[in-house]
Image (cartoon, helix red, strand yellow):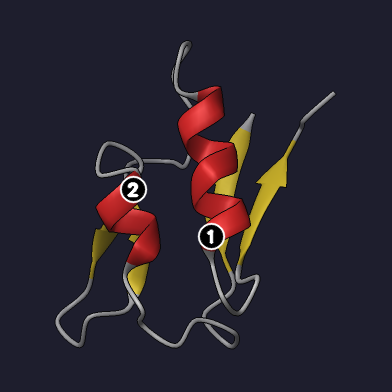
């Protein structure tokens, strides 16, 4: 499973990196960024889904989820 952020939809609320700091960071302007390659480590799937469900703009997508 991987996460990605659509920069066109992200408005910089920061919920992703507040809820899942191991998966997301912020850029110089406060917009969310995906850390590393976006791969969700084992055991972090629930945290990834929490970040997705808490994004007001639905800017985060989960890829490869079965």
What secondary structure is marked by label 1? helix
Is residue 52 shown to the viewer in this render?
yes
Q: Position of residue 44 (x, y in %)?
A: 45, 22
Q: Of residues 42 and 51, which is closer to you in this image?
A: 51
Q: Position of residue 57 (x, y in %)?
A: 61, 79
Please give left or right for residue 22 compared with residue 40 in the image: left
Q: In the image, is residue 3 above or below residue 16? A: above
Q: Would you name the residue on which mark 2 appears?
A: 19
Real-space Cα distance between discs 1 and 2? 9 Å
Q: Position of residue 50 (x, y in %)?
A: 53, 43
Q: Which residue is at 35% across, 41% downward?
A: 23
Q: Which residue is at 85% across, 23% downward?
A: 66
| Classed neighbour count for the residue bearing mark 1: other residues with Cα under 10 Å, few (<14), some (14–19), many (≥20) | some
Q: Quadrant of the N terminus?
A: top right
Quick check: marks 1 and 2 in contact, CB under 8 Å? yes
Tell which residue pokes out farthest to the left in this image.
Answer: 28
Q: Would you name the residue on which mark 1 appears?
A: 54
What secondary structure is marked by label 2? helix
């Amino acid at each position: 499973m991987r996460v990605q952020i659509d920069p066109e939809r992200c408005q910089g609320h920061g919920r992703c990196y507040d809820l899942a700091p191991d998966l997301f960071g912020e850029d110089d302007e406060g917009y969310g960024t995906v850390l590393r390659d976006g791969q969700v480590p084992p055991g972090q799937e629930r945290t990834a889904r929490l970040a997705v469900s808490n994004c007001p703009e639905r800017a985060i997508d989960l890829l490869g989820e079965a």
